[in-house]
Image (cartoon, coloured by chain):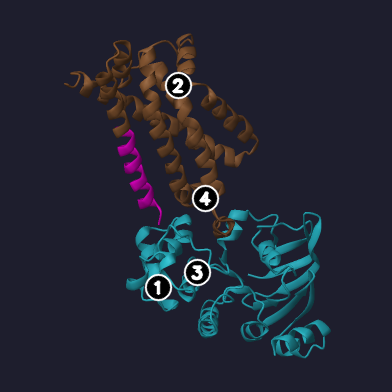
Amino acid sequence: MQIEFRSVTCRIADRSIVEDLSFTLPSGQTLALVGPSGAGKTTLLRLINALRLPQEGEVLINGRSSAVWDPIDLRRQTGYVLQDGGLFPHMTVEQNIGLAPKLAGWRQDRIQARVTQLLEEVQLAPADFRHRYPRQLSGGQRQRVSLARALATEPPILLLDEPFSALDPVTRIDMQRLFQTLQRRHGQTTVLVTHDMREALRLGSLVGLLYEGRMEVLDAPAAFQSSGNPIVAAFLGEDA
Amino acid sequence: MSLPPDLPALLLEHIVIVALSIALAAAIGVPAGIAVTRYPALERWLVGLANIAQTIPSLALFGFLITLPVLGGIGPRPAIVALILYALLPILRNTVAGIEGIDPALRESALAIGMRPSEMLRYVEIPLAARTILAGVRIAAVTTIGTATIAAAIGGGGLGVLIFRGLASLNTGEILAGAAPAALLALLTDGGLAWCERRLSR
């Protein structure tokens, strides 16, 4: 599904968070979004699954404005991964992953088969992990489950808000590889928010720099790096 | 000293009155608490009302109820009405606190998965608030066991019958025969519900 922002402005409590933002993310592409905290990255994600609606302009998902979509329907087409996973602590791994399918009305045996398949995809042994609670998982395992949960109903759109930033460097690289594998296999249109420039350049087919609610640069990784934009240069320099 | 022959029957009556009151108070208080989290304007009214009920001295409240038609009068019915009024506040307050205390990130996670409000209530809010709600029920149950002894003043029955009879005849043994089982019952209930709470707290 294609995602398009047309002159989108979003204010929260009179403060402009996203300002006259326009871009198009073609179906199947991964936009890696970087920018300082407070730049509006999370708000941009929330505009895509209608957790927020723009005050001006429109967000078009598959050509249809987010204000026109039934928000429940739109969110069920969208997988979402939060920094700490956002897993429900009172549900087992199986229940967490099976939740979206259950809400979609899948039969129990189909849900179980899907959970097994997804756990294998995120490289967690199903027999060992399906009955665990989130607190019985390491940070990396939680993010794997969270990723599996987001993919459960094969949504055409995937949104990830700093999914790997709380992980140690080794686990982070593992998760980035896993993400790339899954992304290639499933081909969702993906928006990944990160504060790690190297991660953005590695994972994005497009890299965007959001700065004070505006998209400063949006380009393929190589072109992004050589864009000459002073803010990009500052970001790259800081990271190197 | 021998135990009053009607002790088992009165104890059973006491348990029935308390159990019925708490069940009904929960049946009113939990949905009312959920309503408060949906429509915050209700909070002042409902919590205010429950607060007022709580502040009326219990003996006076039982007295007022005698004059009230339908729900009032004498016997177990007005006693249960009064006990419900007392039990309502802790249950209502804990339901609101339990639901409002849920981590906003989990709420966001539930919304992002595409839950409808009813699904959010069923899969996220009630399970996560269950422990706090149960704690409210526990407080209500323990205090109600004590307050229910006063119900005997308006013919409500229960262990209070022994206490009032003992007071009238200055028979300390009889007072104790009513008071000690009530205290024991309160302790057992507290322990039992605390155990349930721990089971829920995963």
On residue B134, the disc is none
Which callout, 1 or 3, points to the residue nearer the camera? 3
The residue marked by circle 3 belongs to what chain? A
Q: Are marks 1 and 3 in contact (CB under 8 Å)?
A: no
Estimate the spatial distance between the alpha carbons at disc 4 and disc 3, rounded to whole Å. 18 Å
Amino acid tagged 3: Ser
Q: Chain of mark 2?
A: B
The quadrant of the rendering that contains the N terminus of chain B is top left
Magenta stretch bounds? B185-202
Q: What shade has chain A been given? A: cyan
The answer to whether residue A230 is left or right of residue B107 is right
- Amino acid type at circle 1 is Gln
Q: Nearer the viewer, mark 4 or mark 2?
A: 2
Mark 4–mark 1 distance (CA, rounded to whole Å): 26 Å
Q: Is residue A170 magenta?
A: no
Callout in the foreground (3, 2): 2
Quarter occupied by residue B26: top left
Q: CA distance from mark 3 to mark 2?
A: 49 Å
Q: CA distance from mark 1 to mark 3?
A: 14 Å
The amino acid at mark 2 is: Ala
